[in-house]
Image (cartoon, rainbow, N blue to C red):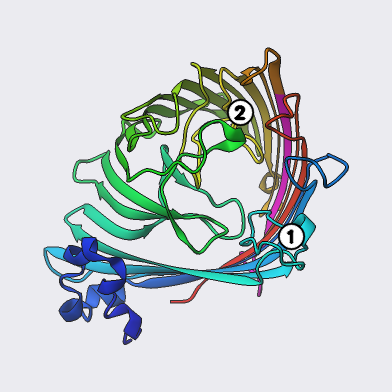
Amino acid sequence: MRPPYSLITPCPALGLGALALCAGFSTATQASGFIDDSHASLESRMVYFNRDFRDGHSSNPQGASKREESAQGFILNLQSGFTEGTVGFGLDALGMLGLKLDSSADSSNSGLLPSSGSNPRGSQDQYAKLGLTGKMRISRSELKYGSLLPDMPLLKYNDGRLLPTQFNGALLTSRELKDLTLTAARLDQYTARDSTDRQDIRVHCKNKRYACNITADHFDLYGLDYKFNERLSAQYQYAELDEIYRQHFVGLLGNQPLGPGLLKADLRLLSSADTGAARAGNIDNRALSAMLGYAISGHTFSAGWQRMIGDTSMPYLDGSNPYLVNYVQVNDFAAAQERSWQVRYDYDFKAVGINGLSFLTRYVSGDQIKVAGSEQEGKEWERDSELKYVIQGGTFKDLSLRLRSATYRTNYEAVARDVDETRLIVSYNFSVL
């Protein structure tokens, strides 16, 4: 099978920093590994999003009282194999398309679609983006440069709306030693989930915790994962957002059979401080979080605890998800000095013969929040539920239907708002190649 022409001459689109990765493409892309190990998948994703801020009117100074939109998305993921030889080269491409199904000007800006300003019909009708990634493999080490969807503790791409956030830069992953994975990355830009424009990388400023729109030249990350055995693994990562913050992470994951069920533990420690010119302001935070769960006969009962220590909230990159056990559908419970706990229940209906159906519900409560400019103790809570079904056979095998609901309440309305939220997601993945 002859590869598409666009796969043969990709180098200029990746920039000068990728020339080393592209060095062998023009003469080597016909190598059998490059073609034979290639695969492609297409995901169709329809999302209905409704967030009611419970203000009762649209003149609230914080913005509209409701966000309600629906959209259809398509994500085409093309991944090549590697050319033959000691050094193998490859190329990946990620194409995305978002189409508006329903939107109005007074309830747009849901994060599904790009804003169209004063358009009386709400958000833009459609948007598309393309990411190209050159890659090189030597032994069991792989270097990627270009568009990335990183999934690591200190850098987890956000995929909570129609299309995911993309980051741009270089990522090295090495598995030369048994049970040990080493990681290094340098990123400089990202493309938000509801945008087509690359932006300079920056710190997330949820609820105006930090100075907004303060960009950095780059973000560096180094880490290692070690698997002691089938029951226990550990992680360490260090990251630095240039002239803004530095961050350490230590995590432990464990599981142990206990009686007829399985006991699971997830422990996380993050330590953050400002660095260099501290361009986003003072940053001083230690975040402790832990989740314990017990699974038995389709049931999983879990309890979580999270504590913020220091003068500020926990920082993380804009467009990413914070690696906290109490980061849930609406809120992250990561405000300055916040203490929060969670109870959660999951059920897999496979235990009673209904394959593909699952349910979860959880409740998170936070208090002792330090609210800037106020002596009042901040408090908040969130209740989530999700029902998911994946069709197991027939024409629509693997079609996923997911209904999610959330209720969030807070007493510090100056920076946060009460929310009732409903999301309906219909997703279908299938192999193209």
Q: Residue at x 49, y 35 (%)?
A: 323
Image height of 149 relative to 62, above or below: below
Q: How many marks?
A: 2
Q: Nearer the viewer, residue 224 or 248?
A: 248
Q: Residue at x 82, y 45 (%)?
A: 59
Q: Nearer the viewer, residue 151 or 281?
A: 281
SS at circle 1: strand
- Name the residue carrying label 2: 333
Which quarter of the figure is the C terminus placed in?
Answer: bottom left
| Image location (x, y in percent) of residue 390 | 66, 58
Name the side, left or right, on which 312 lies relative to 126: left
Which quarter of the figure is the N terminus placed in?
Answer: bottom left
Q: Amino acid at mark 1?
A: Glu
Q: Nearer the viewer, residue 386 or 17?
A: 17
Tell me, yes or no, whether the highlighted magenta stretch contains residue 392: yes
Q: Residue at x 77, y 35 (%)?
A: 418
- Name the residue carrying label 1: 69
Q: Amino acid at mark 2?
A: Phe
Residue located farthest toward the right when viewing the structure as drawn: 56
Mark 1 Cα-neighbour bin, 10 Å: few <14, some 14–19, many ≥20: many
Q: Residue at x 72, y 67 (%)?
A: 119
| Image location (x, y in percent) of residue 207 | 62, 34
SS at circle 2: loop
Q: Which residues are magenta?
A: 380-398
